[in-house]
Amino acid sequence: MGKQFSIVAVEELTLQRDLEAYLTMFACLRGPLPESVGFRRHMLSNDIEIPATWRTFASFDLGSTRPWAWLAFAESDGTDFQYKNGRVGRSLPGDLFLIGEVYGWDGTPDKGDHASIAEITTRIQNYKIQRGWRFQDVHNPKKWNDMFRRNFADDAIGQEMNGYSAQEEFKTPVRINGISHPGIPFELVSKPPGSRETGFTLVRERLMNTAARPDSKIREGKGLFIVKDHCQNTARTLPVLSRNPKKPDDVDPACESHIYDAIRYALAADRAPHFRSYRHA
């Protein structure tokens, strides 16, 4: 059972400021826990191969003057996986791996790139093509397979104004290198009263579950692991989140929390119905 921890090989942080940043995040999202719990175990230093039986989906947080974020997740069914360096890792059923991101900012913290919906769609689809997640069918080149056919977003993008909604606009096809690609259909995640506090708890628990509890040597809960090299803005923004001084069970709205919000939507989404692995995309 000791091999259960092979999935949490982490980037060793040598700079004091990085260490302080991680301690800050866990003071925010975890509460005071012993250092032995492993506050850095959620951050993977090596890329991984996604088993064909794992489920894949994405979440999205819309922004314009402030950043927007599209996140790619893989959900384990409990099968072993392989790091790109050849090492074998183990996971628990339901573990989530954040394996990619597209972040719409102008290079200044918390400043959006003012991209149009068509530009956002193009960037997301192109990113999937570059990662090999959207690809032409070997037997029928006119057909494209897509590993990320399910996308979840805040229900605010479905609100209509004068017959227009961002959700409908995202369905508009775009052209990449002269080839037409479909838009992105979003499934909406509702935000009932208390949903922010619930989301805070869900994220906190997922991060806590990347390591064994203090009274156990076995990791038991579903964790959230982040592939750092492909999620650099996640690694940049998540560690420095702070609590809302007026609502301590929520993140301070002044923080650059767009990726955190997209993670909340992913965890709150009803992912079970018609959920298929990318082999059947």
Image (cartoon, rainbow, N blue to C red):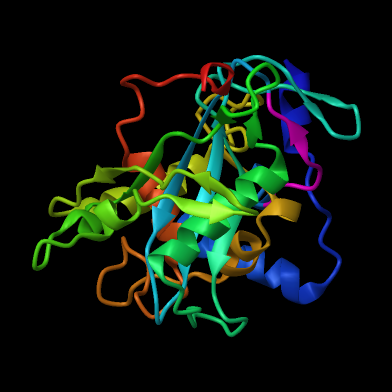
Q: Residue at x 68, y 27 (%)?
A: 50
Q: Position of residue 35 (x, y in %)?
A: 67, 52
Residue 182 in sight in this render = yes
Q: As rendered, which of 71 and 138 lies closer to the eye?
A: 138
Residue 32 visible in the shown view: no
State left or right for residue 266 relative to residue 178.
Answer: left
Q: Main secondary structure of the magenta part?
A: loop
Depth order, front residue of 274/173? 173
Q: Residue at x 26, y 45 (%)?
A: 189
| Res. 132 image quadrant | top right
Most extreme residue toward the right is: 85
46 in the magenta segment: yes
Picture quarter with the N terminus: top right
Q: Is residue 273 above or below residue 269?
A: above
Instruction: Please provide the residue range marked out in magenta.
Output: 40-50
Occupied quadrant, residue 273: top left
Q: Where 45 falls versus 28 (above or below)?
A: above
Tell which of 243 and 157 is nearer to you: 157
Residue visible at 40% across and 82% down? 65
- Name the residue rendered at 91%, 34% in the picture: 85
Q: Position of residue 3 (x, y in %)?
A: 78, 20
- 275 on left or right of 74: left
Relative to the observer, which residue lies in front, 159 or 129? 129
Q: Position of residue 74 (x, y in %)?
A: 57, 33
Work out whether 36 lies above or below 261: above
| 266 left or right, relative to 127 | left
Magenta segment includes 104: no
Query: Residue 193 location in percent, x, y?
Result: 13, 54
